[in-house]
Amino acid sequence: MLKLTPAERSELRAEAHGLSPVVIIGEGGLTAGVTKEIDASLNAHGLIKVRVFGDDREARVAIYDTICEQLKAAPVQHIGKLLVIFRPKKEAAKERSETRGKGMREVTIVKPSASGTKRPSVTKVMIKGNERVTAGGSIKRAKPRQKSAKKSMG
């Protein structure tokens, strides 16, 4: 079970105030499916609220402790039938897919002056991976957009 300092707990309580319960534990109690759903919610959100139906306070406290121990989470707050649970999100390493195109790149565009007697204008421009610079120095998409056959008929 994770331990939080009182300051961290207070901050998380304030953050959880506006949240709605994402998991509801019914008459069946804490089943394997409910535990799996709580785990998935903690992975996605980090801080969640769980509503427990039932009037037995001791049972709710037992459920609270069990959830925190099984899922290595920190208990934040227990008010009535609401439990607030926190577990830091795991940083998922995002790998760049090979199917994507190139990213942004900087290109220098040199245009000769209109009269030919002055210096050429030099501009540095960021262009996207699907764009190219034409011979005239303007930026165009590398591939033309697909046109609808229906639209071109009208």
Image (cartoon, rainbow, N blue to C red):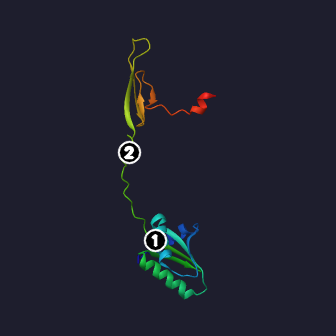
Labels 2 and 1 touching (C-beta < 8 A) = no
Question: Residue 46 location, x and y as percent?
Answer: 47, 67
Q: Residues within 10 Å of mark 2 (few under 14, many from 20)?
A: few
Q: Calculate the distance from the C-alpha at mark 2 to the C-alpha at mark 1.
A: 32 Å
Q: Is residue 73 above or below residue 125?
A: below
The residue lying toward the viewer, choosing from 78 and 29, is: 29
Quarter of the figure with residue 82: bottom right
Q: Which mark is residue 99?
A: 2
Q: Left or right: 151 with respect to 144?
A: right
- Vertical side of 34 occupied by 109: above or below: above
Q: Could you tell me which secondary element the residue under label 2 belongs to?
A: loop
Going from the N terminus, do you reach mark 2 or mark 1 first? 1
Where residue 35 appears, as percent x and y from the top left, is 48, 75
**What residue type is disc 1 on?**
Asp
Q: Which residue is mark 1?
A: 39
* Quadrant of the rendering where the C terminus is positioned: top right
Q: Whole-percent x and y of residue 77? A: 52, 77
Mark 2: amino acid? Thr
